[in-house]
Amino acid sequence: MPQSSQPKLIILDRDGVINHDSPDFIKSPDEWIPIPGSLEAIARLNQAGYRVVIASNQSGIARLLFDITTLNAIHAKMHRLALQVGADIDAVFFCPHAAADNCDCRKPKPGMFAEISKRYQVSLKGVPTVGDSLRDLQSGFISGCVPYLVLTGKGEKTAMTGGLPPGTLTFPDLATTVQHILKGPAPANQ
């Protein structure tokens, strides 16, 4: 875990972890629907002293499915609903590029994680990261994070596909993942 002099961080993917995912992308605030218990789980993390950060691929921008103004409106809804249950999302990092752009920020590359490390002036070694896809876990793992797979979103398919980074722990959803993190190390599904 991070040293006590450093902020306690946790890095979450957005779609499929905090909110229901869609194969057609989340293209409007109306389509952004939280997974039951996810925002309350973020509130529990905040109460335990964690700063919650999101790292999310948002290639819908490059695909012209929505623009930055719409993405900001989606995130405004997310923040508003989070605040209603006492949760605070400290920052949202996102990659607006398509895979063909070959950028450094699109997961599974570690660019967003490097930016988070730089912004918070903290090593990511031991920082929990939660995702529902292999690329979420890979980008966190190569950045030193401890990977957690949730079975919401694409998580069940990801679990069946295999190839998870070493030490990945699997939980049904964000709420049960947070319960495990806050209790400390304990036996879990692997």
Image (spheres, rainbow, N blue to C red):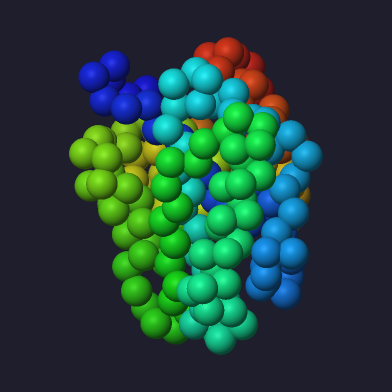
Residue 176 in picture, x, y percent from top left: 69, 28
134 is higher (above) or lower (below) than 31: above
- The quadrant of the image that shows the N terminus is top left
106 is higher (above) or lower (below) than 88: below
Residue 190 showing in the rendered view: no
Q: Residue at x 41, y 56 (%)?
A: 93
Residue 6 showing in the rendered view: yes
Total count of labels: 0
Residue 67 in picture, x, y percent from top left: 53, 79
Tell me: 31 left or right of 61: right
Tell me: 143 left or right of 160: left
- The quadrant of the image that shows the C terminus is top right
Q: Residue at x 72, y 48 (%)?
A: 34
Residue 6 in picture, x, y percent from top left: 26, 25
| Foreground of the two, 170 or 91 | 91
| Foreground of the two, 107 or 91 | 91
Q: Residue at x 63, y 17 (%)?
A: 187
| Foreground of the two, 130 or 34 | 34
Residue 43 in picture, x, y percent from top left: 59, 28
Tell me: 82 left or right of 145: right
Q: Quadrant of residue 177?
A: top right
93 is higher (above) or lower (below) than 121: below
Q: Residue at x 78, y 39 (%)?
A: 36
Q: Residue furthest right?
A: 36
Q: Quadrant of residue 173?
A: top right
| Foreground of the two, 37 or 166 | 37
